[in-house]
Image (spheres, helix red, strand yellow):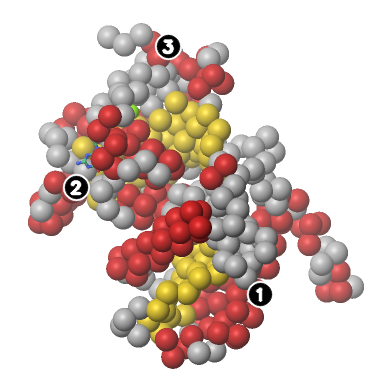
């Protein structure tokens, strides 16, 4: 039986466990809300031992290659990590033996606030025990915080055929829904994702999870819709550069292929610029035309052989917009760039507003206040 204070880190030794991580050695953006000012949105990684929690965290937020996760040690104690992305975020990676019914487990502290509970199930293993744990965890969390979002990752699906994947998801969904319905808890909503660290699916899933924690999501989406419809863009993603998580996209449906192309472009451009760019310290997009890397002016274009163009524009040092559009529409690049600058300003205004409140934009728009 595990020592009870292994996850009782909340009763004293928690701070020792907090790691701070910022993308590519960058400092937190002064435009963005700081850790102390707001309670950061939190991502809780829970699930049985060896289900893949720590691997997900390392691959998505630390760029660990999936093969290296074979050597990740089993987590013995809660690990809290502070991540500085385009938004501040805390990731709590729990040990697999966590028991939410243990008296030392502080449910209020863990499940309170703006929190997403990510429950990882190993789809290559027998999942009945995992479902039991999912049920106890969800019911406990819901009792403490009905606002918490429940995200179930049916993980390691790289070893499953397409039919098997669908069948596993259907079976898991059915079993947990039945159990919740039996307990008259069918008002609890769970979202399911089929994931693997060996392809883009884990980034897609974590993107959707994080989007639910962003209060300004509707505004971002709206701005992206306006940009796309006025610039002839087919699909656009607003990426967090370090993690390749997209924090918003326009409201046309996400097709996996476009997403993969746009996401790969982030890797190509930033890897090349971090090796060959003038200032590897900043390691942001820095084509020769951009004297101040990370100042939101970097851009890159890749023409594809199917008549489409991938266009990347840096919004600030944390965020980049990647658009997919037809080559014919790219002929009006001046218009697109103008529209992009309006979009960029609006996005940065949203961040300023979030940090300083409505007064932040008063000077800028004073004419409209009279
Ligand atoms: N095939 C496959 N293996 C994976 C995937 N994700 C993680 N793994 C492997 O699963 C094993 C366990 O991963 P961990 O990340 O340590 O699991 P954990 O949930 O953190 O385990 P505990 O810390 O013991 O609770 C490692 O060998 C990983 O390489 C995946 O998507 N596919
Ligand atoms: Mg672990």
Left or right of 89 in this view: 260 = left
- Mark 1 or mark 2, earlier in chain: 2
- Mark 3 or mark 1, earlier in chain: 3
Percent position (x, y) of residue 363?
85, 64
Q: Is residue 37 above or below residue 8?
A: below
Callout 2 crowding tier (Cα within 10 Å): few <14, some 14–19, many ≥20: many
Q: Quadrant of the N terminus?
A: top left
Left or right of 313 in this view: 130 = left
Left or right of 364 in this view: 88 = left
Callout 1 crowding tier (Cα within 10 Å): few <14, some 14–19, many ≥20: few
- Mark 1 and mark 2: span between their CA atoms? 41 Å
Looking at the picture, tell me which residue is in the foreground, 211 or 258.
Answer: 258
Q: Quadrant of the C terminus?
A: bottom right
Disc 2 under 8 Å from ligand 1? The reply is: yes
Label ID, residue 157: 2
Q: Is residue 366 visible?
A: yes
Instruction: Identify the image quadrant of residue 263.
Output: bottom left
Percent position (x, y) of residue 302?
42, 74
Percent position (x, y) of residue 165?
15, 52
Residue at 14% across, 35% down: 125
């Amino acid at each position: 039986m595990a020592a009870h204070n292994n996850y009782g880190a909340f009763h004293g030794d928690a701070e020792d466990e907090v790691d701070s991580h910022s993308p590519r050695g960058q400092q937190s953006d002064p435009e963005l809300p700081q850790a102390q000012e707001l309670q950061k949105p939190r991502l809780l990684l829970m699930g049985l031992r060896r289900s893949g929690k720590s691997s997900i965290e390392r691959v998505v937020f630390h760029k660990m290659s999936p093969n290296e996760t074979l050597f990740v040690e089993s987590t013995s104690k809660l690990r809290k990590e502070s991540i500085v992305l385009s938004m501040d975020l805390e990731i709590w990676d729990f040990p697999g033996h966590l028991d939410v019914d243990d008296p030392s487990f502080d449910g209020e502290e863990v499940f309170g606030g703006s929190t997403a509970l990510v429950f990882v199930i190993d789809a290559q293993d027998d999942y009945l025990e995992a479902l039991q744990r999912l049920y106890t965890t969800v019911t406990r969390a819901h009792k403490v915080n009905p606002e918490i979002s429940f995200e179930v990752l049916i993980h390691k699906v790289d070893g499953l055929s397409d039919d098997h994947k669908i069948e596993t998801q259907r079976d898991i969904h059915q079993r947990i829904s039945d159990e919740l319905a039996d307990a008259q808890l069918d008002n609890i909503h769970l979202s399911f994702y089929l994931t693997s660290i060996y392809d883009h699916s884990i980034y897609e899933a974590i993107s959707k999870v994080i989007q639910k924690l962003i209060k300004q999501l509707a505004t971002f989406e709206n701005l992206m819709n306006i940009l796309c419809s006025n610039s002839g863009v087919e699909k656009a993603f607003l990426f967090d550069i370090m993690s390749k998580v997209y924090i918003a996209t326009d409201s046309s449906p996400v097709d996996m292929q476009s997403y993969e192309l746009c996401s790969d472009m982030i890797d190509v451009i930033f890897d090349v610029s971090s090796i060959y760019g003038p200032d590897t310290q900043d390691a942001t997009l820095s084509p020769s035309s951009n004297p101040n890397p990370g100042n939101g002016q970097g851009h890159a274009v890749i023409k594809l052989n199917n008549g489409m163009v991938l266009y990347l524009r840096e919004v600030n040092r944390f965020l980049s917009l990647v658009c997919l559009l037809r080559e014919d529409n790219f002929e009006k690049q001046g218009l697109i760039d103008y529209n992009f600058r309006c979009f960029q300003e609006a996005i940065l205004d949203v961040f300023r507003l979030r940090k300083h409140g409505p007064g932040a934009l008063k000077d800028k728009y004073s004419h409209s206040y009279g």
